[in-house]
Amino acid sequence: MSMASLPQFNPQRIRSYILRLPFCTKALVAAILGLWVATIPFPWVREYGRLEPAKMDLTQMHRLNLFPLMHLNFIHMIFNLFAVTPLLERFESEFGTLVTLALFTGPFGTIPGGVYTLLENFVLRSNTAVMGASIWVFLLLSAEVMKTHKTNPYFSVGPYKVPTWTTPLVLIVLTSILVPHVSLVGHLCGAGLGYLWATGYIKFLVPPEKILRWIETKLNLLGRLPHYVSVDQKTYGRYGVLPTSSVPLNTRSPEGGQRLGP
């Protein structure tokens, strides 16, 4: 095999991909990177943000929001970033920036974190501290795989047919076996919430669309934020209305501009 046939590292393509990321995805990635950098001169930041069940009380609720953004070291952080970024991008492109921001700074951290704390304190009688965006990785994987399950319920492994929806659970078990210091229970809590989200039982966690549209209009988010994903993609397109042109691009269309997205 010649060197020319090997995949070439192209920093320009990576830069282009990062710049095209939706707004909230980019913000969450920046928060993960920023908090990791902060732990270098200030190691106490990691202890402040990690989820430690025995320390949880009303004065420690910030841990439920911070622990998915905190990481043990650079390797832990970079692997989780590679895994969670494309999943976050897909979620935001489907549901919008405001929905993504509301869920991932709120219930998508507090609910699995709270369940994990209860299980550790009252069932397992343990105090295993956890941190990392892998809980979001398995949450989003579980939600995605449920869509695939509707069209492709099974995949074949030799003579066996395995339900597609079990794929994240298999990955969780394999990760727990192959990777040291990972939390099987924490990953299961994330996956469980992902399954619930996919079934629609917890859609009430999303703020009412009427309120989201009012915020978008009042703050002019479509005009102010680059790569902002509108909550109303049917009207505005995935990234809002493109600037109108003085020369009509399609004389058959009654609209002055073109939309990007469905």
Image: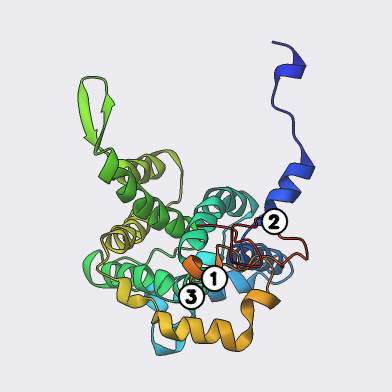
Q: How is the image coloured?
A: rainbow
Q: Decide: marks 1, 2 in contact (CB < 8 A)? A: no
- Which mark is on residue 230? 1
Q: Nearer the viewer, residue 2 or 65?
A: 2
Residue at 69% from the left image edge and 26% from the top image edge: 7
Mark 3 Cα shell of 10 Å, populated few (<14), some (14-19), many (≥20): many
Mark 2 Cα shell of 10 Å, populated few (<14), some (14-19), many (≥20): few
Label 1 vs 2, first from the N-terminus: 1
Considering the image in quadrants, where does the N terminus appear? top right
Instruction: Name the residue type under label 3.
Output: Asn
Q: Can you say whether 43 is above or below 84 in the image?
A: below
Nearest-to-viewer mark from 3 and 1:
1
Q: Is residue 166 visible?
A: no
Q: Nearer the viewer, residue 191 or 201?
A: 201
Residue at 43% from the left image edge and 59% from the top image edge: 135
Residue at 55% from the left image edge and 72% from the top image edge: 47
Q: Is residue 76 left or right of residue 11?
A: left
Q: Is residue 122 left or right of residue 233?
A: left
Q: Quadrant of residue 247?
A: bottom right
Mark 3 = which residue?
65
